Each structure stands twice: as structure tokens, then as C-alpha cells.
Amino acid sequence: MISSISSSLAWRGLLLTIAGATLISFETLLLRLVQADLWTVIWWRGVLLGTTMLIGLVPRRSFRALLLRGSSERLAVIGFAAAISCFVAAIQNTTVANTLVIGSAAPFMATILSWTLLRERQRALTWITVLVLVAGLAIIFHDSLRLNHLLGDAFALGYAACLGAYFVALRRARADAFAAIIGYGGLLSALIASPFAAPLTLSSDSFLFILLLGVLVVPLATLLLAKGTQHLAAPDVTLIMMLETILGPLWVWMALGELPDGATFAGGALIIATVVAHAYAAARRPAATNPQLGTSATR
């Protein structure tokens, strides 16, 4: 009876996580469709996401759930806000494929930060994985010099680093603070963008796309991932989140004809294969030793 319940929860977690990863993969297409400057997009996305997440907390957990406690939760808010800004800037300055492939290195950025800041020891396999990821990133960045995508790729790398910092801070935050951190992070990104944004300049079509993104796609995907990852190990989640890296560029190619270049295919294949191999190796270790390198895409 116990094993059947456990199996049922695992399947539920698997389906919820796949649904969340598939839904979040539409984010890059929606951002591409919004016709506005960088700061205006960050402002609208932050306001809509932050407001939706915080309002959603009130009927379920009362106003106490809106309070942040401790420096880790405040640092997580800052890291999340910075990740949002870098992500949107990357989408506007390089290809979707480059943004998502480079961003997939975020868990290993968290590994480096946890080693340097928290003095946490890492396995030799993890460091080998990091070195291979660096090689894949080098392939992409070298080609970006030719295609004039260097600025966008730099923002994508900043997104991975900020998301890694967010993961590290989140590990020391309360489990029930997740939604509040996302909400405040969204609002903080909007606050940073507000001096440069022109929110009233959006066309009706662009507002519809950003509304769909900030009120439905990202909050619902975040909820699905949060629920799904409660019943799955971190390596399993890492593998499932590769769906976003594959589907995101696919939707943009189908809708807008944006095709990744050869270097992105080569470097991306190396990065994705490395992440998958690392997740497989981690899954074969005892559960107690599996590293929690971040469990969901949270933007």
C-alpha cells in the first residue's frame, strides 16, 4: 500500500513538472512578440508577476505568508529580480536558443557559488561537469563575436549567475517563503526598471502578450513546478527542465522563423548532454547524497 502511494505521488509529480516545464517554454515566444523597449518589458513583467503571486498568497496562507524572515530570503529576492532583468535583456539581444542554453548552466553556477561562499565541498564529477559546460559556453561565445550576439550572451550568462545565486539563497530560506520571494522579486525588478520604463506606450497586442505572460503563464508554471518538484528528486527535475531548453527555441522557430546557428547547436548539444549525464549520475547515487542544485525554473 505504501509503495503504491509513493508511486502514485511520483507519477503525479512527474506529470505536474512536465506540464510546468512545457508551459514555461512559451515565455520566450511571448517576450519576443512584445514590441517594447527593455525597461518597459521588465516593468510590466515584474508588476504583473509580482502582484499575481502575492495576491495568490492571501486567501491561502493569510498575510503572515507575505513576510520575509532572514537575510537569505531577502538575498533570494534580489537574486530573482536580477535574474528577471538579465533574462529579458538576453531575449532582446541574442537568440532564444542561446539564452536558454546558457541559462541552463544556472545550477552549476550555484555549485560554484556554494563552494566559494558557503565552503561546501563538491564531488570531482561535479567539477568535471562544470569544466565541460565552460567548453560548451566557449563555443557559443566564440561564434557570438561573429554574429554580434556577445552582449545578449553576456546577459544570458548573467541570468545563469543570478539564478544560481538565487538557488543558493533559496536553500536557506523557509519552504513556505517561495511564492513571496517570487512576488517581491518581480516587484523589485519593476522598481529598478521604473525610472527608464514607459508602461503606457504598449500597443494593445503587446499588452495582451505581456498580460498572458505575467498573469497566467509564469505564475501557473511556477505553481505546477513547485507542486511537482515536491515529489521528485533534483536530478529528475533537472532532466525534465531540459524540455524548456528544447521547446522554447522550437516555438520561436515555428512562429517567427528564428533558427539557431551551428555553434549554438554544437555548444548547446554539449551543454545539454552534460547536464543530462550529471543528472543521471546523481540519480544513481543514494538519495541522501544527491545535490539539490535548484529544483525549478523560476523567473
Image (cartoon, rainbow, N blue to C red):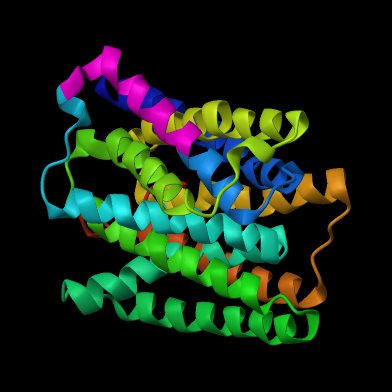
Can you give x and y, in whole percent of width and height, for residue 248 in the image?
68, 49
Residue at the location (35% across, 46% down)? Answer: 233
Q: Nearer the viewer, residue 62 or 259?
A: 62
Can residue 58 be found in the magenta stretch?
A: yes
Question: What count of labels does the image hold?
Answer: 0
Q: Residue at x 63, y 42 (%)?
A: 27
What secondary structure is the magenta-colored segment mainly? helix
Q: Residue 58's image quarter?
A: top left
Task: From this view, report whether residue 124 is shown above or below residue 67.
Answer: below
- Quadrant of the image occupied by residue 35: top right
Q: Residue furthest left?
A: 70
Residue at x 56%, y 49% (from the top left corner): 197
Residue furthest to the right: 257
Viewport quadrant of the N terminus: top left
Question: Taking 127 as reference, is 191 above or below it?
Answer: above
Residue 3 appearing in the image: yes
Q: Is residue 50 left or right of residue 170?
A: right
Q: Is residue 81 left or right of residue 244?
A: left
The residue positioned 11% from the left and 42% from the top of the image is 69
* Res. 296 in view: no
Against 274, is 257 above or below? above
Q: Which of these two is toward me, 234 or 174?
A: 174
The residue furthest top is: 59
Residue range of the region highlighted in magenta in the rendering: 47-63
| Vertical order, 32 against 262 (above or below) | above
Question: Where does residue 294 sit, x and y in percent of width and height?
Answer: 36, 54
